[in-house]
Amino acid sequence: MFKSNRRVFIQSVAFGAGVLGASQSAIAAPDGHAGGYDVAPASEFLKTIPRKSGDPVVFTALLDKAPIKATSGGWAREVTTRTLPLATGIAGAHLFVNAGGAREMHWHNSAEWAYVVDGHCQVTVVDPEGQLEVVNLAPGDLWFFPKGHSHAIQTLGPAPCHAILAFDDGLYSEHGTFGISDWMSRYDAPILSQALGVSTDILGANPKAETYIMQGEVLALDGPQAKVARALDRDRTHRFQLMSQKPRVSTAGGQLYVASAKEFPVSSTMTGTVLKLKPGAMHEPHWHTDANEWHYVLKGRTRVTLFAFDKRVAVAELSAGECAYIPANCGHSIQNIGQEDAELVGVLDSGTYHESSLGDWLAKAPRHLLANNFGVPEAAVANFGRKRMVIASAS
């Protein structure tokens, strides 16, 4: 009996000592320790986190100096992840088609978006349901071909047509383009004759490899070929006349035109933009919550500041012919640093357009939170932030 009571007494003392130890640790000098509910503040800390060192983020490329792919009817240049490894979500291209030229019938394993810079063209598309659309495009118009929609681009009129293209796959050209001349050249004539109901003599004259962009007769802007155009309804058409619309944003500093799936329904996976900035104006610091951004400078000089992953910052100055890639959720701003207006064509790999801005964030945050974040009195941040501008004019 004595031994049993002694054992209980010793166990009780041990348990009490454990409770006392836990209590003492809870009120011990703060040292940042943690163990489940048992946590404490750190007694030693940094005032600010040191900035990262190392190689800067490379997020720009010179599209118009990229290797050229030229055939009889025109040429194209492209920037993919092979050229710009960061650009995993979007590839860009510059397409130039001579007067009388045609980018042959083909399709992709990715969606294709384009902005017509100059000249006129006729686009022919067949969707997976067999619906044909033939539409004529002018400068400022967009085309969009969802993945797998077969299409061709043919110049109309006496001037060449050129366009800036983007694809929602950074590797599109390496593995996902299928052209009609290349495909048909791989079959023996008797097989094609059986499949198409055409004489082998006729098929024997077909190209023996890919023609890519083929030269032909110049088609008049108002000729019979131009007049065969037949557009599908708004929800299915592959053409959108962006620069005929009102800009989404217009300030003293410039304009922002946007074509998301809301405005251009067939463009369900990509949103197109045109940004115009007056000298000194800036597309304010912002980020896109659910899309990568790729843009190309049509004219002017810009400075792009990128707040990238791993807390790295990169700054690049771009001129006409250069492009930039901004990964989703990376903060960035674009400023016109030249003496003339700047114009940029851009695309995001989402059919919705979401933009969160630094100025809007600061304007809406509680003043006591800003005071805490910046280590200043509330009075110092009373007027911090302002009404959202999107495009801020030169100060």
Image (cartoon, rainbow, N blue to C red):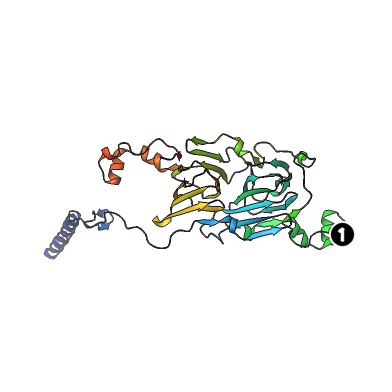
The image quarter in which residue 51 lies: bottom left
Whole-percent x and y of residue 25?
A: 19, 57
Whole-percent x and y of residue 197?
A: 85, 54
Residue drawn 53% across the image and 41% down it: 276
Whole-percent x and y of residue 174?
A: 62, 61
| Along the line of sight, the residue nearer the viewer: 31 or 296 | 296
Tell me if I can see residue 195 in this picture.
yes
Identify which amino acid the numbered label 1 is placed on.
Answer: Thr
Tell me if I can see residue 352 in this picture.
no
Which residue position is annotated with label 1? 200
Label 1 crowd (10 A; few <14 / some 14-19 / many >=20): some
Please tell me whether residue 251 is drawn above or below residue 74 in the rendered image: above
| Along the line of sight, the residue nearer the viewer: 324 or 183 | 324
Residue closest to the far bottom: 3
**Local SS, label 1:** helix
- Report the side of 311 relative to 149 (left or right): left
Residue drawn 88% across the image and 59% down it: 201
Whole-percent x and y of residue 140?
A: 62, 41
Quadrant where the image shows the C terminus: top left
